[in-house]
């Protein structure tokens, strides 16, 4: 793992106990309810791999009508919060580094989901990461990403941009420590252009505080 991806994982490990405060911001509630209602429609009857599930905010919604749902994250601290939730019976958990799908070798999925993960993948790795994910998915698979829109910048501005075009934010944890976190804010055109040759029927939904990208794989 590179330094910036390791630092990001460590930041979320330390933030696990109170990460979900972001989901109680009053101005986000309308978007959240709309996305929570829409998400299960994407995965009915499917075997779903959830990448970087964190504390599992999206897991009960996405998994509601799924056949199987494997919720994964690198950090046992975030997974521990997710495991305590009331969840559909189809949900299982696994510790998994999203940059190495080796641990799920041999398991087949016909859908994938990741919430607030895309924005943290360095741009130089994004195409390769999407290819590696797609390689785990059967033809006809449904893929959904959702993430923060640029409105998030009004509370946490960009601190710098690197040579590859990645943007960064300085985030302060409750203990006062400041962490530089890579956080990108793609446009619809940019995100769709990165999906690669197997992506079909890409749909971009722009909420105020979030974007959603859904597509199927050839
Ligand atoms: C912004 S949080 C998103 C959590 C959740 N999906 C959500 O939308 O609320 C990013 C998550 O990525 C996880 N993470 C960081 N690096 C990872 C990696 N290499 N592999 C898998 N998960 C990772 C962190 O533990 C954290 O839970």
Image (tube, rainbow, N blue to C red):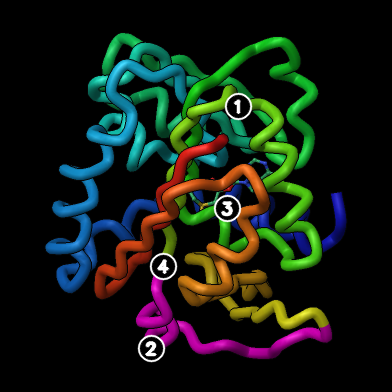
Which residue does the image show at 28% across and 23% down from the upper left?
Answer: 44
Q: Is residue 171 left or right of residue 10?
A: left
- Quarter of the rendering containing residue 43: top left
Using the numbered discs, state the Cα–Cα distance from disc 1 to disc 3 in whole angstroms.
27 Å
| Among the two numbered marks 4 and 2 on one chain, the one whose residue lies closer to the N terminus | 4
As drawn, 23 above or below 135: below
Rounded to the nearest angstrom, the CA distance separating label 4 from label 1 is: 25 Å
Q: Which residues are magenta?
A: 149-163
Please name whichever residue, 70 or 106, is drawn nearer the observer in this view of the structure. 106
The residue pinned by badge 3 equals 12
Q: From the Cβ of disc 3, is ligand 1 less than 8 Å away?
A: yes
Question: Can you identify the residue that label 4 sits on?
Answer: 148
Nearest-to-viewer mark from 3 and 4: 4
Asked which secondary structure carries label 1, the reply is strand
Relative to residue 6, is residue 102 depicted above or below?
above
- Frontmost of labels 4 and 1 is 1
Q: CA distance from mark 4 to mark 2?
A: 12 Å
Return the x and y of residue 7 as percentages of the image width and height. 74, 59
Q: Is residue 110 magenta?
A: no
- In which image quadrant can residue 8 be found? bottom right
Q: Position of residue 114 (x, y in %)?
A: 49, 44
Between the C-alphas of marks 1 and 2, the distance is: 36 Å
Residue located at (15% from left, 69% from top): 26
Q: Which residue is mark 2?
A: 154
Tell me whether the residue at label 1 lies in contact with that at label 3, contact meaning CB atoms closer than 8 angstroms: no
Q: CA distance from mark 2 to mark 3?
A: 21 Å
Q: Which quadrant of the view contains residue 121?
A: bottom right
Which label number is shown at residue 137?
A: 1
In the image, residue 189 above or below residue 132:
below
């Amino acid at each position: 793992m590179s330094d910036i991806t390791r630092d990001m994982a460590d930041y979320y490990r330390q933030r696990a106990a109170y990460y979900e405060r972001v989901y109680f911001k009053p101005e986000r509630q309308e978007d959240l309810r709309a996305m929570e209602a829409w998400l299960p429609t994407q995965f009915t009857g499917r075997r779903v791999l959830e990448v970087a599930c964190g504390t599992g905010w999206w897991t009960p919604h996405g998994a509601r009508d799924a056949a199987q749902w494997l919720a994964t994250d690198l950090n046992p601290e975030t997974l521990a919060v997710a495991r305590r939730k009331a969840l559909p019976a189809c949900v299982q958990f696994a510790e998994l580094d999203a940059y190495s799908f080796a641990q799920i070798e041999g398991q087949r999925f016909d859908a994938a989901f990741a919430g607030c993960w895309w924005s943290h993948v360095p741009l130089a790795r994004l195409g390769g990461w999407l290819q590696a994910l797609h390689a785990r998915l059967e033809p006809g698979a449904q893929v959904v990403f959702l993430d923060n829109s640029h409105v998030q910048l009004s509370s946490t501005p960009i601190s710098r941009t690197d040579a590859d075009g990645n943007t960064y934010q300085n985030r302060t944890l409750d203990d006062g420590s400041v962490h530089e976190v890579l956080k990108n804010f793609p446009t619809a055109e940019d995100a769709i252009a990165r999906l690669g040759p197997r992506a079909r029927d890409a749909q971009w939904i722009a909420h105020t505080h979030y974007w959603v990208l859904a597509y199927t794989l050839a």
